[in-house]
Amino acid sequence: MTMSPISGLLSVHDLPPNSIYVLPFVISAAAFCYFISVIVFNLWFHPLARFPGPLLARSTLLWRMRKTLEGRIHRSIEAGHQKYGPVLRVAPNELSFASVSSWKSIYGHRPGGMMPTKSEFYDMYGSGFNSLCIGSERDPEKHRQMKSFLSAAFSTKALLEQEPLVSQTVDAFIARLGNDGGSETKGLDMTKWTEMVAFDILGEMAFGQSFECIVRGEPHYWQEMILKHLYFVTVADNLRRLPFALTLARFLAPILTAVRNKHSQFTRDKVAERMANTNLRKDFMSNLISKVESGEVDREEMTAHASTLIIAGGETVATFLAATVYYLLKTPEVYKAMREEIRNRFPTYESINATSA
């Protein structure tokens, strides 16, 4: 057996002939021992070891990853709190709190006016843009400045000015439900239709023109792209927690980022189209455009803000509406009570508006 010329170490070629077949076993055994040691540490020696939770959640990231990728993490956490109490360990390094006191401590006013800092999840949320935005900025002071740029668009006065556009879209939505979802039809997928009406409204309010999903009776392709992008964010948020995340990211990047890049590029195109059209009425973008033209806001930041407005203002509203319809139909007595309250309070359909409601 000869020695390697480098630092007097043995090389692979210097090993006995049969030793090379032992290497896979040694590597596998080392990986297994490492995995077991991590589990033992997480269960008994980790600083959060005293907090309760499912065994798989306390020992590995597998529980959290599985539940988030299934889209059921919220229900699993709720069930976990019912079983284990107000403090739940949902991952080796992560706790979930469900109590009034914890809510105040985490999200309430803090000494010196300090604001709570967002989690690392929001780094994934802003992926695809070369600038942070109102949704992804984690620095409280910078977030406060961004908020001031957008606040004018969300004042009571500004929103009331947008109400005719919202009402117009809602009227078209209700008309389509009556025509396409009658007793002689196959029914409608309300999840899809609530996404469509929310997306049309956001198009009117953010870009000055509807995406016309309701008119066409089918989703806009950007709407479907956003749903895939949100799944990318979920996958990326899980991958960043793994010790070998960078290696995985390099391997999976072309697969995972394809939809993200399409979404970010379409947002850029839509913002460019909006900035070029100076004849549109005032919308959410109007104040930001003036900030971009004066040099106060970078154009890429404005684009990232637009993405957040579409995702946060569209998909969240659609999810709420679809869930509301589902639970109302699942509980007929609640649906009946709501219907009677609305009909007793408002004499006509036209009398229902933001002020009277």
Image: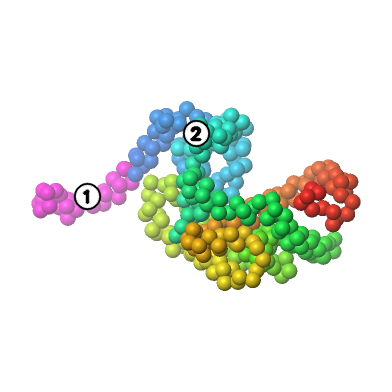
User: Which of the two marks, 1 or 2, is nearer to us in this view?
Assistant: 2
Per the rendered image, the range of residues in magenta is 1-30
Q: Are marks 1 and 2 in contact (CB under 8 Å)?
A: no
In this rendering, position of residue 34 left or right of residue 161: left
- Image position, residue 51 (x, y; %): 50, 29
Q: Secondary structure at mark 2?
A: helix
In this rendering, position of residue 137 left or right of residue 80: left
Question: At x 44% / y 63%, what residue is drawn?
Answer: 254
The answer to which of 257 and 143 lies nearer the viewer is: 143
Is-magenta flag for residue 208?
Answer: no
Q: Which mark is residue 112?
A: 2
Question: At x 33% / y 46%, what residue is drawn?
Answer: 28
Q: Secondary structure at mark 1?
A: helix
Q: Which residue is mark 1?
A: 19
Question: At x 79% / y 61%, what residue is drawn?
Answer: 171
Which quadrant of the view contains residue 348? Answer: bottom right
The answer to which of 45 and 299 lies nearer the viewer is: 299
Give the crowd class for mark 1: few <14, some 14-19, many >=20 residues within 10 Å: few
- Image position, residue 240 (x, y; %): 43, 49
Give the crowd class for mark 2: few <14, some 14-19, many >=20 residues within 10 Å: few
Looking at the rendered structure, the kind of residue marked 2 is Gly
Question: At x 45% / y 50%, what residue is drawn?
Answer: 239
Looking at the rendered structure, the kind of residue marked 1 is Ser
- Image position, residue 269 (x, y; %): 54, 69
Is-magenta flag for residue 10?
Answer: yes
Please say whether residue 209 is visible from this viewpoint. yes
Above/below status of 116 relative to 193 = above
The number of numbered discs placed on residues in the rendered structure image is 2
